Amino acid sequence: CSRMSRALEEVCGLEGSAGYHFGTFLKKLCPKATATHLQMFKCWLQEYDQLQKQKVTLERSKETLAALENYILQPVITERVKQGLISSFAMVDRSDDGRVNTLELQTSMEVERDTAKSMKKYFDTNGDGFVDIEEYIAAMCPEGHRLPPKVQDRIFDLLLSAEVERQEQIVTEQDALFKHPAERKAPRLKARSFLRKQVPEMVWEDWLAAWEALDVTKLGYLTRAQLRDTRAMRMDVIEFTFDLIAGSSEADSISKEQFLNKLLDAAGFRPRGAFPPKE
């Protein structure tokens, strides 16, 4: 501590310096250190900063997984409640065209136009400028309940659980580099892809059926808005899952191959040689 304090005092006392370069501080702290030593120390600090960011990302991923699991536990709305919402939509849809606009929301709900605009923005998850019956039912679904899932819940749970496990392994391995050798644990090795088992045909068929349920346009790809429109999960979980499959938060769509490959990797199966051709 005394050496560090002295080094700080010397650096801060340099003439004409409003601040100081970190390399200068390290040189004062360790006068005999070479440029290589200083660069190594700088890299260690950068890696440590990156580790802290990875830990924050891991916590967010865990929170998203917990949100999904809590959502899955919620009961599905009854047919009676759903029919009541359908009747309610018919009253709002005064033009009887299956789409509700801002004016219809404002008139039916007896609210200010700005409030109606905010409501439409919240309801309209596919971004087409209107509220259809599916969007209305999803938005008005009673708290503590959810819509019937279009895709098996375990598929999304598999994706998120595997991502949390992957991030945990990275954080554990990186964290071990900053610990005493006696405290380190042997890293867990991941099986190479060619050593993994082939995905069972029944599981593969389930995944293909899940994609078909999601890809309503049958174009072989799924946009972010289309995934939102499936109501498969909470909206924040949908955004996280889309980014996970796409590999980027900037992507506009995900392909069938990306979806299936992500599932194969998450479940620990080896890649398949080829995917079924598009019909």
Image: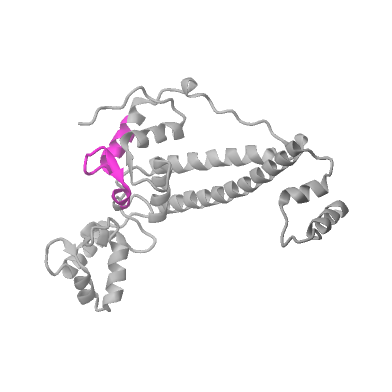
Residue that protrudes farthest toward the top in the picture: 195
Rendered position, 115 above or below 164: below
Q: Is residue 165 left or right of residue 224?
A: right
**In the picture shown, does residue 1 fall above or below 179?**
below
Q: Is residue 192 left or right of residue 254?
A: right
Q: Is residue 154 visible?
A: no
Q: Position of residue 6 (x, y in %)?
A: 86, 55
Percent position of residue 171, x then y: 61, 42
Q: Quadrant of residue 146?
A: bottom left
Q: Residue at x 46, y 43 (%)?
A: 160
Which residues are drawn in magenta?
Answer: 205-228
| Coordinates of residue 234 in the picture (x, y in percent) | 39, 54
Q: In this image, 72 relative to 133: left or right?
A: right
Q: Nearer the viewer, residue 224 or 44?
A: 44
In the image, 177 versus 236, the foreground residue is 177
In magenta segment, residue 116: no
Q: Is residue 210 magenta?
A: yes
